[in-house]
Image (spheres, rainbow, N blue to C red):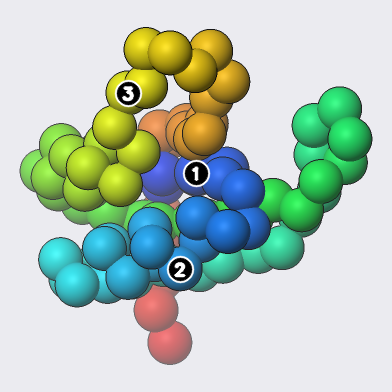
Amino acid sequence: MKMIITIIKDNDTDALTKALTTDGFRVTTIASTGGFLRSGVSTLLCGVDDDQVKKALEVIHKVFPPHPESPEARCTLFVMDVADSQHF
C-alpha cells in the first residue's frame, strides 16, 4: 500500500478532490500553509493499493498538466510506503 501526499493551492482543492473521488479514490484534505508568502494550501492524503498508484497519478496529472511557460509548480506530491492500514 502507498500513501500519496499532494500539496496544492486552496483554489485547486475541489477540482482534484472531485477528480480522485470520481475515479473511486478516498481523499482526506488538511488545510495547511506554506511557501514564501505563507499562502493557503491544502494537503491531500490518499491511501491506495500498490496496483492503483499509476491510475491515481494519472488522475492528478490530468488536473495539473505541465505548463512550460510557468516555472512555478502547482502541485507537489510524495508517494510513500505504508506498513499497515486499518479501517474501523
> For residue 61, what is the image quadrant?
top left
Name which residue type carries label 3: Pro
Q: Which mark is residue 41?
A: none
Vertical position of residue 1 compared to residue 19: above or below: above
Left/right placement of residue 62 relative to residue 69 reads left
The x, y position of residue 58, in whole percent, is 18, 39
Q: Which residue is mark 1?
A: 6
Q: Which residue is mark 3?
A: 66
Determine whether label 1 and label 3 are within 8 Å by CB. Answer: no
Q: CA distance from mark 1 to mark 3?
A: 16 Å
Name which residue type carries label 2: Asp
Left/right placement of residue 86 relative to residue 33 reads left
Residue drawn 65% across the image and 64% down it: 30
> For residue 20, what is the image quadrant?
bottom left
The x, y position of residue 74, in whole percent, is 52, 34
Left/right placement of residue 41 relative to residue 57 reads right
Residue drawn 39% across the image and 79% down it: 87
Q: Tell me which numbered mark, 3 or 2, is placed earlier along the sequence.
A: 2
Camera-near label (1 vs 3) is 3
* SS at badge 1: strand
Name which residue type carries label 1: Thr
Residue drawn 58% across the image and 59% down it: 11
Q: Which mark is residue 14?
A: 2
Q: Say few, some or many: other residues with alpha carbon within 10 Å of mark 1 (under 14 / 14 to 19 / 20 or more).
A: some
Q: Is residue 63 visible?
A: yes
Vertical position of residue 66 compared to residue 28: above or below: above
The x, y position of residue 5, in whole percent, is 50, 44
* SS at badge 3: loop
* SS at badge 2: helix
Q: Say few, some or many: other residues with alpha carbon within 10 Å of mark 2 (under 14 / 14 to 19 / 20 or more).
A: few
Residue drawn 50% across the image and 55% down it: 12
